[in-house]
DNA sequence: GTCATGGATGAAACATTATAACATATGCGC
DNA sequence: GCGCATATGTTATAATGTTTCATCCATGAC
């Protein structure tokens, strides 16, 4: 597979890749994962997950709501937030605190917190899974007697396509 | 000085330390720093900074507003947010994205982004300045061609005083 | 001195993000 | 079918943050 725009080695997606394929893959994986876990990926939750993936970058809850209303009537804020809560519990979606926005997870199999590189120019967010970052945090925390529960790492800057060439 | 509860070596403050002293020190330092920079630490901004420090932990903008109204009449949300913007520009205050809250900075002299250990039990937040964490982030970002602007590192867990003894 | 200028604050309204509370529906085991 | 837990519908509200325009005030030019 030569076009894996969301693989760990190339977390920033190519500009014109077949994103429909990404979405389909993510949904299929979510389906399988929930079945395995006995979690109920209902129609609503599946729709919300699909919308998150379609956005192809961090998307706010109210933007999701607006799009969801194109798919079903009667959707309200709790509709979206509850679906997102489920999806986050399952590791299918991450929340980016700095942006108040949500993004699909590439590798939901193992529970984890995302580390993100967020481009301030084009808005894309690339997820990292860098053990060295987590280790550096954990070492310092341990030295201070702090028992780590979760790590939020959100880096802003310019992605390879948006940064000045030189 | 044997009681420096906010020194880099002991970022979690002792329970009963003289916090009034911390506040006074922070204000004096802010005063000197702004004078040096030609920045105007006005009465309002000074009051807000004092309230942030007095809270002795992350505090929300609307909590600050409520307290500020005890000191002056007519304060509104922009009153607080504008003061906080100034204080953040000067590095005197950091924002913790996960908490939508603000906290005084221990070492505002050099511009930096904070790294925080946030106790989910008692709510205190300890600021780190750990080059190794920043380096780990920068290494991975550089490998991906990402040009870093700012790094948000917010770790939740249990502080030494709240964690189970064993 | 006073006058122009720009930054700081006052004041009202509004925008965005998230949750509470309670009712209804739906799926699933028995 | 019944009963139960979970999921969803619905309304309202809370919490957080911004826009806009008016007014004030310190500072420097003249």
Image (tube, coloured by chain):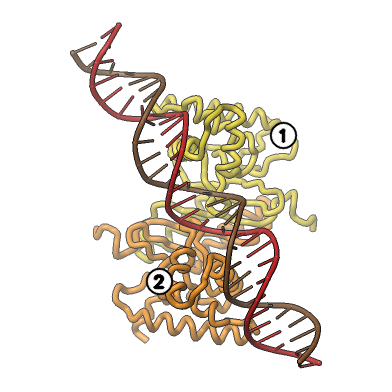
Chain colours: A orange, B yellow, C red, D brown
Rendering coords of residue B153 (x, y %): 53, 54
Q: Secondary structure at mark 1?
A: loop
Q: Does residue B91 show up?
A: no
User: Whole-Å distance between the Cαs marked 2 and 1?
Assistant: 50 Å
Q: Against B23, is A66 above or below? A: below
Residue B17 is tagged as: 1
Q: In the image, what residue occupies the spot 68% across and 57% down?
A: A147
Front label number (2 vs 1): 2
Viewer-side residue, A119 vs A144: A119
Crowd around label 1: few <14 · some 14–19 · many ≥20 (10 Å): few
Q: Quadrant of residue B158?
A: bottom right
* Relative side of B7 to A27, left or right: right
Looking at the rendered structure, whether the residues under marks 2 and 1 are on a common chain is answered as no
Q: Quadrant of residue A9?
A: bottom left
Quadrant holding the C terminus of chain A: bottom left
Viewer-side residue, A12 vs A41: A41
Q: Which residue is mark 2?
A: A55
Q: How many marks?
A: 2
* Relative side of A5 to B70, left or right: left
Chain of residue at mark 1: B
Rendering coords of residue A153 (x, y %): 51, 59
Q: In the image, what residue occupies the spot 52% across and 43% down?
A: B94
Q: Quadrant of residue D23?
A: top left
Q: Secondary structure at mark 2?
A: helix
Q: Against A140, is B58 above or below? A: above
Q: Against B163, is A129 above or below? A: below
Q: In the image, what residue occupies the spot 55% across and 28% down?
A: B73
Viewer-side residue, B162 vs A27: A27
Chain of residue at mark 2: A
Rendering coords of residue B137 (x, y %): 46, 59
Q: Does residue B20 show up?
A: yes
Q: In the image, what residue occupies the spot 29% across and 61% down?
A: A162
């Amino acid at each position: 597979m030569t076009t894996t725009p969301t693989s760990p080695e190339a977390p920033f997606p190519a500009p014109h890749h077949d994103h429909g394929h990404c979405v389909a893959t993510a949904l299929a994986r979510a389906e399988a994962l929930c079945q395995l876990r006995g979690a109920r990926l209902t129609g609503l939750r599946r729709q919300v997950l699909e919308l998150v993936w379609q956005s192809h970058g961090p998307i706010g809850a109210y933007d999701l709501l607006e799009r969801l209303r194109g798919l079903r009537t009667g959707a309200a804020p709790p509709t979206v937030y509850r679906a997102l809560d489920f999806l986050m519990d399952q590791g299918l979606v991450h929340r980016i605190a700095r942006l108040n926005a949500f993004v699909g997870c590439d590798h939901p199999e193992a529970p984890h917190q995302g580390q993100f590189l967020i481009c301030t120019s084009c808005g894309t967010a690339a997820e990292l899974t860098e053990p060295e970052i987590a280790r550096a945090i954990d070492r310092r925390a341990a030295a201070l007697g702090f028992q780590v529960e979760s790590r939020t790492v959100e880096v802003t800057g310019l992605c390879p396509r948006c940064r000045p060439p030189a």
